[in-house]
Image: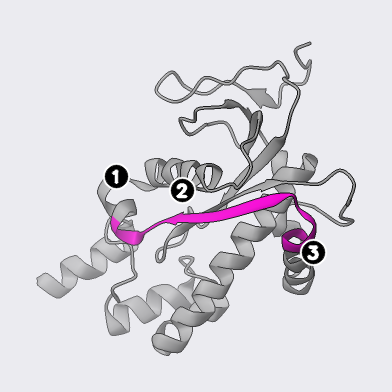
């Protein structure tokens, strides 16, 4: 039966339509990390949990500490039936825009699962085009365990990427701000210009590049 809750949202007609009925079989949760930052890829994860191996403490990754996320990351990888982590690159973000790049990363994550789910639950109100039944759930990362698990995998993976980028470009402070447009990051951009991993179509970076050309 359809849920009475308003949190289940149908996708726009330009994307896959969300249906609100259930089929028997495996269910995958999907979420992303890195839509807002000024640099780096957008990362998506898909997770099919094992009902026989419950994981305590799953939640929206933003509500957990870095230490909690790291611990849960290892537990999810060990206990889930299968999981997949994918990304869309900075070049793809600049080429097709961040929304479409996010949908692409999610599609890649689902397609990378070792087991094919009967249904996919995606955090938010939009869906990638998939060849399986899918449903978008607003704030699903806080209410659906499989989406919470995907949120954690995506967040930890992107944070680790930022730490590696920080070692390569220490002048920007990526380990601290994770690529978001903080005052520190903007100041570093203005002082040092953009590095190859900055998103050229994002406004603060675009302005810095324009100043450099002018």
Ranked by sequence position, the earlier of labels 1 and 3 is 3
Q: Which of the 4 quarters of the picture holds residue 176?
A: bottom right
- Observer-nearest of 150 and 62: 150
Residues 58 and 138: in front is: 58
- First to last magenta residue range: 76-91
Quick one: quadrant of the N terminus? Answer: top right
Coordinates of residue 93 in the picture (x, y in percent):
34, 52
Q: Residue furthest left?
A: 214
Query: Upstream in the sequence, badge 2 or badge 3?
Result: 3
Marks 1 and 3 sit apart, C-alpha to C-alpha, by 34 Å
The answer to whether the residue labelled 2 contacts the one labelled 3, judged by CB atoms less than 8 Å apart, is: no
Q: Are dots 1 and 3 in contact, CB under 8 Å?
A: no
- Of 118 and 156, the residue lying toward us: 118
Report the residue at 29% width, 84% height from top.
192
Q: Is residue 30 visible?
A: yes
Q: Which of pointers 1 and 3 indicates the residue nearer the eye? A: 3
- What residue is disc 2 on? 105
Q: Say what secondary structure mark 3 lies in.
A: helix
* Label 1 Cα crowd, 10 Å radius (few <14 / some 14-19 / many 20+): few
Label 2, label 3: how many angstroms apart (C-alpha)? 23 Å
Q: Residue at x 47, y 46 (%)?
A: 108
**Which residue bears the numbered disc 3?**
75
Above or below for 108 versus 212? above
Local SS, label 2:
helix
Q: Are marks 1 and 2 in contact (CB under 8 Å)?
A: no
Give the Cα distance between marks 1 and 2. 12 Å
Asked if 118 appears above or below 102 in the picture, the reply is: above
Q: Which mark is residue 64?
A: none
Q: Is residue 212 above or below residue 148?
A: below
Asked if residue 98 lies left or right of residue 206, the reply is right
| Residue assigned mark 1 | 96
């Amino acid at each position: 039966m359809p849920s009475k809750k308003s949190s289940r949202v149908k996708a726009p007609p330009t994307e896959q339509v969300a249906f609100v009925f259930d089929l028997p079989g495996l269910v995958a949760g999907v979420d992303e990390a890195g839509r807002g930052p000024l640099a780096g890829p957008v990362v998506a994860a898909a997770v099919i949990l094992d009902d026989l191996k419950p994981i305590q403490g799953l939640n929206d990754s933003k509500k957990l500490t870095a230490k909690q996320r790291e611990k849960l990351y290892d537990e999810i990888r060990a206990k889930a039936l299968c999981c997949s982590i994918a990304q869309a690159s900075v070049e793809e973000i600049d080429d097709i825009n961040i929304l479409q790049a996010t949908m692409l990363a999610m599609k890649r994550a689902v397609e990378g699962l070792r087991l094919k789910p009967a249904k996919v639950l995606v955090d938010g109100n939009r869906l990638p085009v998939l060849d399986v039944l899918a449903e978008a759930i607003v704030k699903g990362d806080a209410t659906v365990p499989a989406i919470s698990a995907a949120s954690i995998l995506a967040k930890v993976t992107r944070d680790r990427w930022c730490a590696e980028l920080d070692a390569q470009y220490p002048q920007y402070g990526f380990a601290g701000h994770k690529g978001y447009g903080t005052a520190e990051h903007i100041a570093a951009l203005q002082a040092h210009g953009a590095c190859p991993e900055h998103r050229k179509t994002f406004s603060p970076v675009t302005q810095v590049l324009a100043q450099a050309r002018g």
